[in-house]
Amino acid sequence: MKVLIEGYYYDPAVLEREQVTDGLIEYHRRPSDGFVCYNYVGHVYSPMLKDYIFFLPKVVLEEKGTEGVDDDRVFGEKPEDIICVSDKDGKMNAAQRGFVCELAVWVYRALMIYRETHPDQNILLERNIAQIGNRRQRLSDTLLDIILELIRFNRENQDYVLFVLKSIHSGYNKINWRRTIAHSQAIVQDGVPVYLRPVNKKKQVNFDEELFIIYFSILNYISNHYGFRVNINMGFELITGSKFRHYLDGYGRVRMRQIRYKYFSDKALRLWELCYAFFDKSHAINVRDDQKEYLLAQNFNIVFEAIIDELVGSKDIPSGLKEQKDGKRVDHMYTFADLVYPGAMQKQVQKEIYYIGDSKYYKIGSTVGDESVYKQYTYARNVIQWNLDLFLSGDEAKKQKDNPKNIWLRDETTEGYNIIPNFFISAFVDKKLSFENDNLRRRETVFNARQFENRLFDRDTLIITHYDVNFLYVLSLYARNNAFSKASWKVQVRELFRKNIQDELNSNYSFYAITPRESVNAEQFMQQNFQQLLGKVYTPYGETGSQEYYSVALDNGERFANENERTLSLLAPYFYMEKCPVGTNPESVLPKVEQQAKGVVVPESLLTLHYVQRYLKDNFLIGCYKDEAQLNWIMGANDKGTNLYNVRIFTKGLKRAGTMKRSQLEQGGIKFVILYRLGEDFKNEYRVFHVHHHAVMSEERMRQALYPNPQGNYFCFVFDEEVSISPDVNLAKILTECRLDTDTDYQEGAPVVFKGEELLRYQTR
């Protein structure tokens, strides 16, 4: 076997010396300053050379010093010095030669899987002449040829195997009466002896059967280890596990030699030769000499991207995320547990986030260029904008279709943005040449982009990490095509990515979990202190019952010490606060707080004051809530987390108390809503809210909004803030007069509307 490295620049004189050029004369090569290179991965059989040429992936190259022809090494040697693998006097040792043969099998399998899963691909060059008739034969000791010949024998000789097995087992169930009478006790029944333990004819050692057992055990190993599709229909007890490993470690070759002269037919001898070659590794076998045969990938970086996407990415990504509107295409994307959220310990709507990855098919030790980093930032910005466009669209059906996991990156309360994990993944070759361990490791280099400093939860703060994975492991995992193994590693590697990014965040930021103190309205506090908290506070945790949790992220840099101190001092009087690294359950560090109602807040001094005299011609709606549960719903315990109040719309034929006509509500120009608790108006306690806009909600929409037992349509006022009014009004007097007014037929708790000039008549002295 001859070995060339993908993309490596060779001196044509070296290729001539190694007798490689003639075998590749028809393949495209790229000349550069007198050197030539071949951008292929795979194998070619050249009848002219009567040998294989195997193109190794360039990931086996290790850069030494500055980039150049003389800098790259494979196994510590120059690629020019290891072209001839079969040269036992060359610079490649036995283990390295075995590795190259093994790698050839895995690359072949990977390209075959890629061909099956990407039928429309145009990067594979393939030619495999059908094996028909008596063609010329050649000697081959490559593992790939041996495996393919073993599989071919099974496919083409089913009748032969069945015939031999039928001959072997004929007569096995006949009773040996002489031995049965001599060694078994009979029971006489009706004068006839009955033998309960008959003795069959003794089975002799049959070497044909042993050969088949060894052969099918090899096929079973090939199927399980390499992923080749092999049909084994014979009911033999196969050699597996540690016993077969014993055969691979040398006993197989010994045993095959012991039974060598037990076979005489051509097919039995051929089968013995194939099995012996498999265990011996260096034994040459005759294989049919086709015309030129090859399986090559022209752009193996595309195959590598497909490998990583199969093992890490997800296929159920909504349109517009992976194939982006500006023409960019994200290599890998999936949804997984977000970074701040602690996991399954706590229920919340938003518990997953988009992960964005880009695979880099480089030589070992190569660094990521500025262009790649910039593109990766752009991918994340496009994802954020896609999510915002969907959120603001108002198209509920589209939201359900494109965002079934209810992932919203922006938090309406704090206007903070969740952290999008973003990473590069490149490959290296394990120094022990092992296919068994992923050896996934994170590079020290971390890329950061930001518009404002010390604002982790800002849409322009983006972080990219970089990972290296053992190329041999992912290649074999993909080529083996075992669904369970791939799924197991996918979960494992996603957890590892998440953990590593969390560690990076925890090392650069101090995270605090906060929850509002009793009688504090957190939403209004955030609105009042919006500029000081923007980008520093986010709500990844959701709520537990009536308790709210927020995350605060502060940069650990010394130059931010004073700014961080001011932020913590601002929060401390209104929130319980404890250090809480990302991924930690805030319930484990914060006390349980019993809120009277979700919106009982803010000290009145923090409420915006509105003078009724400025709204003499505007309308004020006075309504009620029946209990704390309804107040919590009004104050944001709904699917949108918004503050809103609902009024029943009059519907002909539907009897509901306290209704109002839709036209009256729409044309009334209602600026403020005054709310009191039903049955407690005598206390003269009320809360006032400024109306931002209104909307009509159907019964089904109210049910989605978590409103209990909705009936019919509702007119909803959406509030932007709680306020105070001056002068105070005597609410008890207003409602008492409504009850006494016989012209209005007032129903208890029904909403009533007053103009500002009318309210002034009820001001308290």
Image (tube, rainbow, N blue to C red):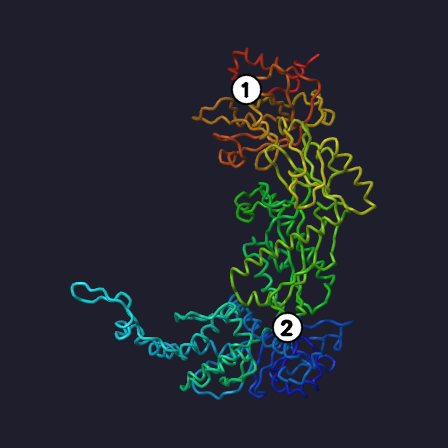
Quarter where residue 295 is shown: bottom right
Is residue 119 in sight in this rendering? no
Q: Quadrant of the C terminus?
A: top right
Q: Position of residue 456 (x, y in %)?
A: 72, 46
In the image, farthest residue toward the left: 190
Front one among 453 and 266: 266
Q: Amino acid at mark 2?
A: Pro
Above or below 383: residue 92:
below
Q: Nearer the viewer, mark 2 or mark 1?
A: 2
Please say whether residue 442 is visible from this viewpoint: yes
C-alpha gap between disc 2 and disc 1: 78 Å
Which is nearer the eye, 187 or 234? 187
Q: Which mark is residue 172?
A: none
Indicate the secondary structure of the residue bearing disc 1. Answer: loop
Amino acid beneath label 1: Gly
Say which residue appears at 51% left-offset and 24% top-offset: 659
Q: Which residue is mark 2?
A: 57
- Above or below: residue 744 compared with residue 71: above
Where is residue 511? Give x, y as percent.
72, 43
The residue indicated by pointer 1 is 749
- Image coordinates for residue 689, horizontal then vertical, percent: 65, 27
Dot 2: within a 10 Å radius of its alpha carbon, few (fewer than 14), some, or many (20 or more) residues? many
Which image quadrant: the N terminus? bottom right
Residue at point 71%, 83% (across, down): 11
Quadrant of the rendered structure where residue 374 is? bottom right
- Residue at the (45%, 24%) spot, across then down: 655
- Looking at the image, is mark 2 or mark 1 earlier in the sequence? 2
Residue 192 lies left or right of residue 575; in this view the side is left
Nearer to me, 213 or 102: 213
Left/right of residue 556 with respect to residue 190 in the rendered view: right
SS category of the residue bearing label 2: loop
**Residue 457's spot in the image, x, y percent?**
70, 45
